[in-house]
Image (cartoon, grey):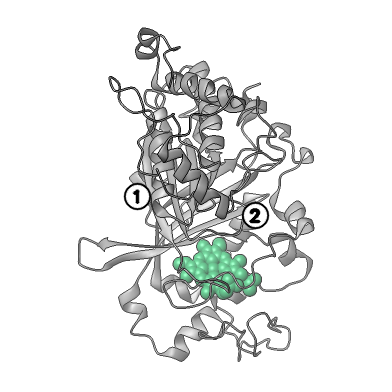
Amino acid sequence: MGDKINRRTFLGMTAAGAAGLILGEFMGKEREPELVTPATKQVANDESKAELIPFYGAHQTGVVTPQQNFANVAAFDITTDDRKQLQELFKTWTEMAATLMAGKPLAEEPQEGKFPPIDTGEQIGLSTGKLTLTFAVGATFFEKEGKDRFGLQSRKPQGLTEMPIFHKDSLQEQLTHGDIVIQACSDDPMVCFHAIRNLAKAARGVAHLRWQQTGQLGIKSDGTKRNLFGFKDGTNNPALNDDSFMNNNVWIDGADGTPWLAGGTFMVVRRINMRIETWDQQPFTNQEQIIGRQKVSGAPMDAHNEFDQPNFAQDANGDKTALDSHIRLSNPRDGEKSERERILRRGYNFMENLDSVGRMNAGLLFVCFNKNLQTQFESIQKRLANPKKPDQMLSYTVTTGGGYFAVLPGVTGPGTYLGQNLFG
Ligand SMILES: C=CC1=C(C)c2cc3[nH]c(cc4nc(cc5[nH]c(cc1n2)c(C)c5CCC(=O)O)C(CCC(=O)O)=C4C)c(C)c3C=C
Ligand SMILES: [Fe+2]
C-alpha cells in the first residue's frame, strides 16, 4: 500500500469503503510492474502449478465448478439502512473476490505498520486450491418485517421466500436464513476461512456474520465422494458440462420475470444433522434399502454398476427399491415431470464437536442449485418430508439450519460489480 491514501480519510470511512479504496488502488496498479516480495513470489510460484478458477463470466463460479474438497458457507445480516453503503460493499467484495481468486494478496506486503493489516495474511504462501466465491441474497435483503429496506422490494425475485419449516425440521434461528450468503470453496480449508474472514472484515459497519458452516469431502483423486452414512453421494447428479441441463434446470434467464437475475440461480442450503450413532446400529441391508442403492458400488438395487439407471417401472411394488427409499422419493423417474424437477446438488459433510448430550455433531451441509425453488427443490423436499409417507432416511436426520438465496449473475469483466443490475 503506498502513501497516496489520506490516512484521515481512511480512518473516517466505513471499513467497506476503506477496503474498496485500497483495493481500488491495488487493482488499478495491476498493469504497472508489481512489487514482488518473497510472499507474493511464493504465491505466484505455487499458482503457476495449480489451476485458478477465473472470476469473470456470465455466471458466478461455485455452481458448475467441479467440487473442491472444502467449503465455508457464511450468512450475513445487513446492519446499515443506507443503500449507498450496501452498494459500495458489493463493489468492494467484487474486487476482493477477483483478487482472492487470482491468488493475490489484498494488500501489498509489507503493509503499513501503523494500521491494522488490510489482509489478515494466513493465506500467504498457500495455493488458492481453486478457490471460488459465490455471492447470493436472501428474501430479507429486499424486505424485512414488511419494510422495503433499500428501495429494492419490487425487485425481489418471485419465489424467493425465507426457507419454510418442513416436517421434522428443527431450525435454530442462529443457524438459519440471512440477508446475504457467501459460499467459499477451495481444496484448502485455510483459504476458505481466509476469504470469509477478510470479506467479513471489509463488511464491518455494513453487515455482520449471522452464521458460518464449514464442510468437507474426502480427498480422493476421482470418483464419487461419500457422505457420512458411507454411501456415494452425487452419482445421479447432472454432468457439470451439460449446458442444456443447466439452461433448463439451473440458470435463470430473462424469461423468468426477473431480468436483473438472468445468469443467476437459486441456492438452497440445509444443515442436516445425521444421527450417526443410530444409523451405525442398522443392518447393512437396511441401510441399502433406506437409501435405495448398494453401499459399496453405489449401483441401484436392481443393477450392477454405479451409473446404471434403476428401472422403477418394472418394480411397481418396491420389491427391489423400496417405495419410501431416498432415491425413489427424490427421483421417481416419472418422465417429463421428474426431469423438470431435477436439481444440481453440491453438498459437503460436516463433523464438529459433540452436541450437548454427547452425540456426534455431524451431518450433511446440503447445497443445491435450481431455477425454481417451488417446482424443483420444494417439490422433491415435500415428497421426502411427507408426514404420511416420509423418506425412511428422515428417521436418521434432522435439519437444524440453512436458507434460500438468489445467487447473483456473474461479473462479466473489470469495471462491473456483483449485483450491478440489481442496484442499477
Ligand atoms: C430435497 C432434496 C434432498 C435432500 C434434502 C437430500 C438429503 C440427503 N441425501 C443424502 C444421500 C443421498 N442422496 C442421494 C440422491 C439424491 N438426493 C436427492 C435430493 C435430496 N437429498 C436427489 C434429487 C437425489 C438423486 C436421486 C436420483 O436421481 O436418483 C443419494 C444416492 C446417490 C446420488 O445419486 O447422489 C444419496 C446416498 C443424505 C445423506 C441426505 C441428508 C442427510
Ligand atoms: Fe439425497
Position of 223 relative to 407 (above/below): below
Q: Secondary structure at mark 2?
A: loop
Q: Residue type at mark 1? A: Gln
Dot 1 alpha-carbon crowd within 10 angstroms: few under 14, some 14 to 19, many 20 or more: few
Q: Could one spot residue 184 in this view of the protein?
A: yes
Please state the horizontal and vertical placement of residue 286, each as a whole percent of the image.
45, 87
Judging by the rendered image, the residue that carries numbered circle 1 is 172
- Residue 250's mark? none
Q: Could one spot residue 387 in this view of the protein?
A: no
42 or 261, which is in the foreground? 42
Residue at horizontal 42 percent and vertical 58 percent from the top: 215
414 or 91, which is in the foreground? 414
Please state the horizontal and vertical placement of residue 333, each as a whole percent of the image.
71, 73
79 or 52, which is in the foreground? 52
Q: Residue type at mark 2? A: Val
Residue at horizontal 44 percent and vertical 41 percent from the top: 195
Dot 2 alpha-carbon crowd within 10 angstroms: few under 14, some 14 to 19, many 20 or more: many
218 or 227, which is in the foreground? 218
Q: Which quarter of the picture shows residue 64?
A: bottom right
Position of 36 relative to 167 (above/below): above
Judging by the rendered image, the residue that carries numbered circle 2 is 64
Q: Secondary structure at mark 1?
A: loop
Q: Which corner quadrant holds the N terminus?
A: top left
